[in-house]
Image (cartoon, rainbow, N blue to C red):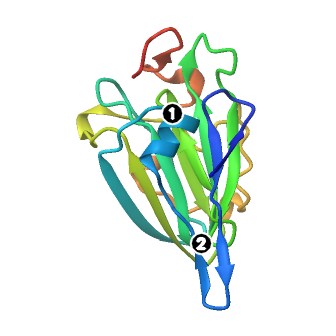
């Protein structure tokens, strides 16, 4: 696998080695050994999958300690714009984000470390989205930010009037109003 660094330390794009022939293709979607060597030692404990239609926007979500999560995400079908926002107070990149288009054609994966809010918008008629988490989901630990925070100024690549949100995602605070964020100096692992 090829690890591509982004503008924010720890947030990386992973490009698998794809082997194609007249039968189709093959690639190793995850190797614990290679991930630990090239990205960071981690133990994923839960895999999730969602199916969504065009315009669905999920996010910007995170889990607070002691249930903070890293995520390794990818698209099986369709295309999304996937976003990681640095919400570690004191970080040199606090409030900045990385956005990457994940598609069934490019097979890219995106690693979002603990201390980041995560979300994605669906760019095609249908998407099947998979992600690995390094901590179990804990509803009492949920946190989120407004997807349309003007200070973040994220271009989700879909018109605002086409955005489909859950009821919960319609009512999250902006980054500057958030009552709970991570501290850059805390050891989140």
Q: Residue 148 — which label?
A: none
- Residue at 73% x, 38% y is 153
Provide residue 156's location: percent of width, then percent of height.
Answer: 69, 53
Query: What element does badge 2 sit on?
Result: loop
- Residue at 55% x, 43% y is 111
Provide residue 186's location: percent of width, then percent of height.
Answer: 45, 11
Q: Is residue 19 above or below residue 32?
A: below
Provide residue 172's location: percent of width, then percent of height.
Answer: 47, 38
Q: Quadrant of residue 43?
A: top left
Q: Is residue 14 above or below residue 5?
A: below
- Residue at 29% x, 32% y is 141
Which of 106 and 116 lies nearest the eye of the viewer?
Answer: 106
Residue on which the image places disc 1: 113
Query: What element does badge 1 sit on?
Result: loop
Provide residue 68's location: percent of width, then percent of height.
Answer: 37, 30
Give neighbour class at mark 1: few <14, some 14-19, many 20+ (Cα, 10 Å).
many
Q: Which callout, 2 or 1, points at the residue further toward the start of the chain? A: 2
């Amino acid at each position: 696998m090829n690890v591509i660094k982004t503008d924010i330390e720890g947030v990386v794009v992973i490009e698998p080695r794809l082997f194609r022939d007249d039968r189709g293709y093959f690639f190793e979607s995850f190797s614990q050994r290679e991930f630990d060597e090239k990205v960071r030692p981690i133990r994923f404990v839960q895999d999730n999958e969602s199916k969504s239609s065009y315009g669905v926007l999920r996010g910007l979500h995170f889990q607070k300690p002691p249930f903070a999560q890293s995520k390794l995400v990818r698209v099986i079908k369709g295309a999304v714009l996937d976003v990681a926002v640095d919400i570690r107070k004191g970080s040199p990149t606090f409030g900045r984000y990385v956005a990457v288009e994940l598609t069934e054609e490019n097979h890219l994966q995106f690693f979002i470390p603990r201390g980041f809010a995560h979300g994605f918008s669906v760019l095609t008629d249908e998407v099947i989205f998979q992600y690995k988490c390094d901590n179990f989901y804990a509803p009492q630990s949920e946190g989120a930010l407004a997807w349309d925070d003007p200070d973040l100024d994220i271009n989700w690549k879909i018109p605002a009037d086409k955005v489909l949100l859950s009821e919960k995602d319609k009512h999250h605070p902006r980054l500057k109003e958030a009552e709970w964020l991570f501290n850059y100096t805390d050891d989140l692992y």
